[in-house]
């Protein structure tokens, strides 16, 4: 078995590395090392890597989409007696024949980015930074603000919506602690309350306590305490009638997100 594998790509090399790593798992006890060589797009870079591979007696696994660069690499490897495996060429050829169309040969096509991509990345970073009531001063910057007691899916819903480009912050409602004043100073059209039925929340919290190895009679999971929390949240929601309240009981995140976005779109159209 070769002691080293060079993973060569004209993009990031992530795809090829995953394929190689998956294959190596089938060889128990293998000590083969892999090295990723990303953004190899010139003949000079190809010549250099082939020289290194020859010296290291390495196997070259590549995903160069440019047919000329791919052929150049294959030729140099043959001349240097370096083992090489083309991971993408045969697949591109098969797809071209199947669709009767030529491939674009665009390096990094899998990772092509646009304005929407950057918007989603920014939204995810915003959601992480503003999870669970952190930095309330940023609430004014959010597209959506979720409000609810613990275990009403605030964080997973924030993440789901953020991955679709929405800047989301969430604020926990905790008995005995006033919500941040900033919450009541922003556009109420951004705010959505999350509610849940007591039976469902009791089951969720009991499971959470068990997973944490905590006593089942901890206040967090006691039915009476849960009902008081729900009543506390309901009081805040009733005092802010412009906040739509969505019941998340036994609902998938996708369902809750769909209802919330439908409300959001309806509001935007009515403005």
Image: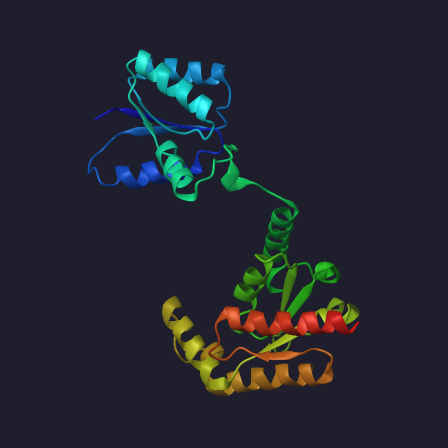
Q: Quadrant of residue 4?
A: top left
Q: Say which of 77 and 53 sits in front.
A: 77
Q: Compared to 102, does 72 lie above or below? A: above
Q: Quadrant of residue 34?
A: top left
Q: Tell me: 95 left or right of 167.
A: left
Q: Residue furthest front?
A: 100
Q: Is the image coloured rainbow, by chain, by secondary structure, or in one colour?
A: rainbow
Q: Compared to 3, does 178 lie above or below? A: below
Q: Say which of 1 and 89 sits in front.
A: 89
Q: Position of residue 232 (x, y in %)?
A: 62, 83
What residue is rendered at 41% in x and 18% in y? 72
What residue is rendered at 30% in x and 41% in y? 22
User: Would residue 260 be seen by someone viewing this image from the given angle?
Assistant: yes
Where is the C terminus found, in terms of image quarters? bottom right
What residue is rendered at 39% in x and 75% in y? 215
Q: Position of residue 26 (x, y in %)?
A: 22, 40
Q: Compared to 256, does 36 lie above or below? A: above
Q: Say which of 179 and 62 sits in front.
A: 62
Q: Quadrant of residue 265?
A: bottom right
């Amino acid at each position: 078995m070769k002691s080293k594998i060079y993973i060569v790509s004209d993009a990031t090399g992530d795809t090829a590395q995953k394929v190689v790593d998956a294959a190596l798992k089938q060889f128990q006890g293998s000590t083969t090392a892999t090295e990723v060589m990303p953004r190899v797009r010139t003949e000079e870079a190809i010549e250099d890597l082939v020289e290194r591979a020859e010296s290291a007696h390495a196997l070259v696994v590549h995903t160069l989409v440019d047919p000329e660069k791919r052929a150049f690499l294959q030729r140099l490897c043959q001349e240097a007696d370096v083992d090489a495996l083309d991971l993408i060429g045969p697949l591109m050829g098969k797809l071209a024949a199947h669709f009767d169309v030529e491939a674009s040969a665009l390096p990094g096509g899998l990772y092509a980015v646009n304005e929407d991509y950057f918007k989603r990345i920014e939204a995810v970073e915003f959601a992480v930074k503003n999870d669970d009531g952190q930095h309330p001063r940023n609430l004014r910057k959010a597209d959506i603000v979720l409000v609810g007691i613990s275990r009403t899916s605030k964080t997973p819903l924030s993440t789901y919506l953020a991955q679709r480009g929405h800047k989301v912050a969430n604020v926990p409602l905790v008995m005995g602690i006033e919500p941040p004043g900033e919450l009541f100073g922003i556009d109420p059209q951004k705010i959505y309350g999350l509610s849940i039925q007591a039976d469902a929340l009791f089951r969720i919290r009991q499971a959470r306590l068990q997973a944490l190895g905590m006593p089942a009679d901890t206040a967090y999971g006691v039915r009476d305490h849960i009902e008081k929390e729900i009543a506390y949240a309901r009081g805040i929601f009733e005092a802010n009638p412009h906040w739509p309240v969505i019941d998340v009981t036994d609902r998938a995140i996708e369902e809750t997100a769909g209802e919330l976005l439908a409300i959001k779109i309806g509001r935007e159209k009515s403005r």
